[in-house]
């Protein structure tokens, strides 16, 4: 409600503000001088104890400036005017509703007419005297009085008329009256500014009117007359929707006119709200219609909305607004035509029809429309294509994830067709017939965009993924025989690998299309392997073919990092399937699986020699995973588990022969030790020292000689294995031995090892001996600890734990206090 004052008044205000700033600066400078004086005095007092007192907090100076005000004069003015207008409006409402009955008809008319005319004419007089804010407040009061006049007129003269109809007429009249009042005030108030533009120029340029409230209020009131009229005559949903769209069109005209900014903002908000409601209603009417004629009526409303949006885009002053409006227009066109197609065509062809309409919108690129409009229409096409692709996702996901259910019932029998194998536990959607066409159409659009260098390489990758999805779901949609479906998926794997190799050659290295094709090949191979679980022959054949295919692909330098682990994975599955087919038990199948880690070690060594370091780690990881699977399969049979551990140790030892993999020797030693312990456990040996002492003595001797030749060798490498061979099995045997001899001998040996480690300052003997000695002591004290725990009351352990926590907390608090004192002491130092 604040108005810009005339130049003379504004100059006076600026001078007053500058004087206040100068006064404030003087106060701050005096404060700064006082603080400098305080610091100097304090420094002198530290050298002379007991000298002087601290000066006051703020210097008292004569003629000091007054305290700074917390509210500006314009703010106080606006608050007072707002409160005054609200109070007068409340009083007018109370008079109209409560005191109305005490006056006659003539008195009522005279009072209302006099108060309203006074309130509406006073702003012009106030504006001529430069009181703009007061004029705005009085004008708001006058407009509120016109609303009360309309209510009073209804109560006196039109009481028998319908409420909605009268409200529609009254809102229309009030909107027109407020708009005319705002224009009249602009014409009646002279502009005395030198060199100011004329009123017509200001109107064309959207300058601020004399009164700012009437025009925006008129636009807001103009939103409801048509809607209230439609409700008054009990109009149907189509008429109500048309009313909303017509209101949005009128608001669009107001928003696009060169008017004052608040008027344009109100028009824009009204256009968006009314247009959104109208489009949603029209879309519901179109897509819920059962007959083509009813759908066409809804489509006509959507066409009207599209026309309004296109007109707004054509005359929009900003490119962003034009883009959004044209995007909405394109979506309305597709939605209207799609609703008609839905009423004419079978249900599964609705989405393909809408997709065709969305693709047809791309022809706007060749039209002479402005660039923002073309971009908006293309954006609408992309939205339609994206929604169509989302419509196909359930079918694609079901095709890829459905075969996972075969893991629970492998080799259950040959299915009727490939669809029966994939969708055994899921219902088939009838709309899925057209899904491959939708995916292929969108893939073609993206491929054309990639060919014309639009959004590379994202468009090429998208085209590749959608084309792959279309090919993968096609056998399921066509219900191909089971064998033909397997062959089709295998062909997809081969083609994807070929595309990856071609893309790699074209770019000279890994690229987005090449990596995408590789990932698609891997995903398809996993799905194919799962689908083949339905029959025994199919599983063996598919896994053998996949292992061979990826093995051949591993000969290509750019693909080996992906294809070699895939080949090893399929080979692992093939070993498991071959063992199950031969009737082998799981622990015996583990011996077949061990072939994969051995091959992986050879392939990794060859890749390292050939300089393909990128493939070494993935291949070794695949081999390690296969070895872990073999251990899991053999865990139920201790003799076989010992053999598997020993063979894994052999593979690890072979890997350790490479200079860059020397650390694998530690894993090999650990595996050999585990194999020995498991073998002893399988033989049910109760005295493992008879087998381990000789090995420990030999290993310790070898470690001692190695450390004499190379003192830099760690004690773990020299003595760790030798000590562990005896100490660990003895510990395990001790926990099941009720006699006292083994704990005594083991404790004595552990004490000796600990003392030797302490004297020689070697970590391995110290840690292994000390740990063994602690465990032996715990074993000996365990019965007494259990006895004491049984004697203590049940509240004692929680109480003991609470005391420990309290002691720790007190200690922690003491440490914090000490740290705080130290910090304060350091702070006092110079």
Image: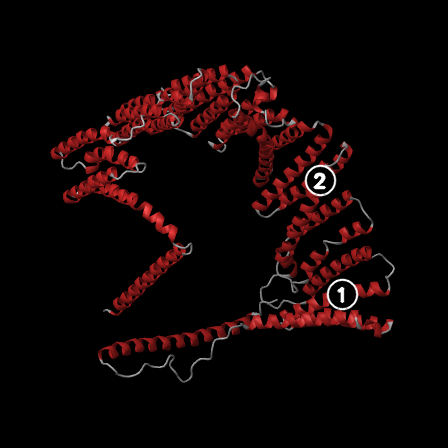
Q: Nearer the viewer, residue 410 or 793?
A: 793
Vertical relation: 55 (above or below) 815: below
Could you tell me residue 556's position as x and y percent? Answer: 36, 21
| Quadrant of the frame with the C terminus | bottom left
Which residue is the extreme one toward the left?
708
Vertical relation: 823 (above or below) 547: below
Q: Can you identify the residue that label 1 sits on?
A: 146
Distance from the alpha carbon under mark 2 to that under mark 1? 39 Å
| Quadrant of the frame with the N terminus | bottom right
- Is residue 764 at least partly visible in the picture? no
Judging from the image, what secondary structure is the residue with disc 1 in? helix
Sort mark 1 into few (<14), some (14-19) or many (20+) by Cα contacts within 10 Å. many
Could you tell me residue 83's position as x and y percent? Answer: 65, 71
Q: In this view, does 125 lie to the left or right of 526?
A: right
Q: Which mark is nearer the camera, 2 or 1?
A: 2
Judging from the image, what secondary structure is the residue with disc 2 in? helix
Could you tell me residue 200's position as x and y percent? Answer: 66, 58
- Is residue 500 at least partly visible in the picture? yes
Vertical relation: 738 (above or below) 344: below
Q: Are discs 2 and 1 less than 8 Å apart at CB?
A: no
Sort mark 2 into few (<14), some (14-19) or many (20+) by Cα contacts within 10 Å. some
Could you tell me residue 562's position as x and y percent? Answer: 39, 26
Q: Which of 608 and 348 is in front in this view?
A: 608
> In which image quadrant can residue 116 be found?
bottom right
Q: Can you identify the residue that label 2 sits on?
A: 284
Residue ID at (66%, 26%): 430
Q: Nearer the viewer, residue 806 or 152?
A: 806
> In which image quadrant can residue 821 be found?
bottom left
> In which image quadrant can residue 190 be found?
bottom right
Q: Is residue 611 left or right of residue 90?
A: left
Query: Residue 589's mark?
Result: none
Mark earlier in primary sequence (2, 1): 1
């Amino acid at each position: 409600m604040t108005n810009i004052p005339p130049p003379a008044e504004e100059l006076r205000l600026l001078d007053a503000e500058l004087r206040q700033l100068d006064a404030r600066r003087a106060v701050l400078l005096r404060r700064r001088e006082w603080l400098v004086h305080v610091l100097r005095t304090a420094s002198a007092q530290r050298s002379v104890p007991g000298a002087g007192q601290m000066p006051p907090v703020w210097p008292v100076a004569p003629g000091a400036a007054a305290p700074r005000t917390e509210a500006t004069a314009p703010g106080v003015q606006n608050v007072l005017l707002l409160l005054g207008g609200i109070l007068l409006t409340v009083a007018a409402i109370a008079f109209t509703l409560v005191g109305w009955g005490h006056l006659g008809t003539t008195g009522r008319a005279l009072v209302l007419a006099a108060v309203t005319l006074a309130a509406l004419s006073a702003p012009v007089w106030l504006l001529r005297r430069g009181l703009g804010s007061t004029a705005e407040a009085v004008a708001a009061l006058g407009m509120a009085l016109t609303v009360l006049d309309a209510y009073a007129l209804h109560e006196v003269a039109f009481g028998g008329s319908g409420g909605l109809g009268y409200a529609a007429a009254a809102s229309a009249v009030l909107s027109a009256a407020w708009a005319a009042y705002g224009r009249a005030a602009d014409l009646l108030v002279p502009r005395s500014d030198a060199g100011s533009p004329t009123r017509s120029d200001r109107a064309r340029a959207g300058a601020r009117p004399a009164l700012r409230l009437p025009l925006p209020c008129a636009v807001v009131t103009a939103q409801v007359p048509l809607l209230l009229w439609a409700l008054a005559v009990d109009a149907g949903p189509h008429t109500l929707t048309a009313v909303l769209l017509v209101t949005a069109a009128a608001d669009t005209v107001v928003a696009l006119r060169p008017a004052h900014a608040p008027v344009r903002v109100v028009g824009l908000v009204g256009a968006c709200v009314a247009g959104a409601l109208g489009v949603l209603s029209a879309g519901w009417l179109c897509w819920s219609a059962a007959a083509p004629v009813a759908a066409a009526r809804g489509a006509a409303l959507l066409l009207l909305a599209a026309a309004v949006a296109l007109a707004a885009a054509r005359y929009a002053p900003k490119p962003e607004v034009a883009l959004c409006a044209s995007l909405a227009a394109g979506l309305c066109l597709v939605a209207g035509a799609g609703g008609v197609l839905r009423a004419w065509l079978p249900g599964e062809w609705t989405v393909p029809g809408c997709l065709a309409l969305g693709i047809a919108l791309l022809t706007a690129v060749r039209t002479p429309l402005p660039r923002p409009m073309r971009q908006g229409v293309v954006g609408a096409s992309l939205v339609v294509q994206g929604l169509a692709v989302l419509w196909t996702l359930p079918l694609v996901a079901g095709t890829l994830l459905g075969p996972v259910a075969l893991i629970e019932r492998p080799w259950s029998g040959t299915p009727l067709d490939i669809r029966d194998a994939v969708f055994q536990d899921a219902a088939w959607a009838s709309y899925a017939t057209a899904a491959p066409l939708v995916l292929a159409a969108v893939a073609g659009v993206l491929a054309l965009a990639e060919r014309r260098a639009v959004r590379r390489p994202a468009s090429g990758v998208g085209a590749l993924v959608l084309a792959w999805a279309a090919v993968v779901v096609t056998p399921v949609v066509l219900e191909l025989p089971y064998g033909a479906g397997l062959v089709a998926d295998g062909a997809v794997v081969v083609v994807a690998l070929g595309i990856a190799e071609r893309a790699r050659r074209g770019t000279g290295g890994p690229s987005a299309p090449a990596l995408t094709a590789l990932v698609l090949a891997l995903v398809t191979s996993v799905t194919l392997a799962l689908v083949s679980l339905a029959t025994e022959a199919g599983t063996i054949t598919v896994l053998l073919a996949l292992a061979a295919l990826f093995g051949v692909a591993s000969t290509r330098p750019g693909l080996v990092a992906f294809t070699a682990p895939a080949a090893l994975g399929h080979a692992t599955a093939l070993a498991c399937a071959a063992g199950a087919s031969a009737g082998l038990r799981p622990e015996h199948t583990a011996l077949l699986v061990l072939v994969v880690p051995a091959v992986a070690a050879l392939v990794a060594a060859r890749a390292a020699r050939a300089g393909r370091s990128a493939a070494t780690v993935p291949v070794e990881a695949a081999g390690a995973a296969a070895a872990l699977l073999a251990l899991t399969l053999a865990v139920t049979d201790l003799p076989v588990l010992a053999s598997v551990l020993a063979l894994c140790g052999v593979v690890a030892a072979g890997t350790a022969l490479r200079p860059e993999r020397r650390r694998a020797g530690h894993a090999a030693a650990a595996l050999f030790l585990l194999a020995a312990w498991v073998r002893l456990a399988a033989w049910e040996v109760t005295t493992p020292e008879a087998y381990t002492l000789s090995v420990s003595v030999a290993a310790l001797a070898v470690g001692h000689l190695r450390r004499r030749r190379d003192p830099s060798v760690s004690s773990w490498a020299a003595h760790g294995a030798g000590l562990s061979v005896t100490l660990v099995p003895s510990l395990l045997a001790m926990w099941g031995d009720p006699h006292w001899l083994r704990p005594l001998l083991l404790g004595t040996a552990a004490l000796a090892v600990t003392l030797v480690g302490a004297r020689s300052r070697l970590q391995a003997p110290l840690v292994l001996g000390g740990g063994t000695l602690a465990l032996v002591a715990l074993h000996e004290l365990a019965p007494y600890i259990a006895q004491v725990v049984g004697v203590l009351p049940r509240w004692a352990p929680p109480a003991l734990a609470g005391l420990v926590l309290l002691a720790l907390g007190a200690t922690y608090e003491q440490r914090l206090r000490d740290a705080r004192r130290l910090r304060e002491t350091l702070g006092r130092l110079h």
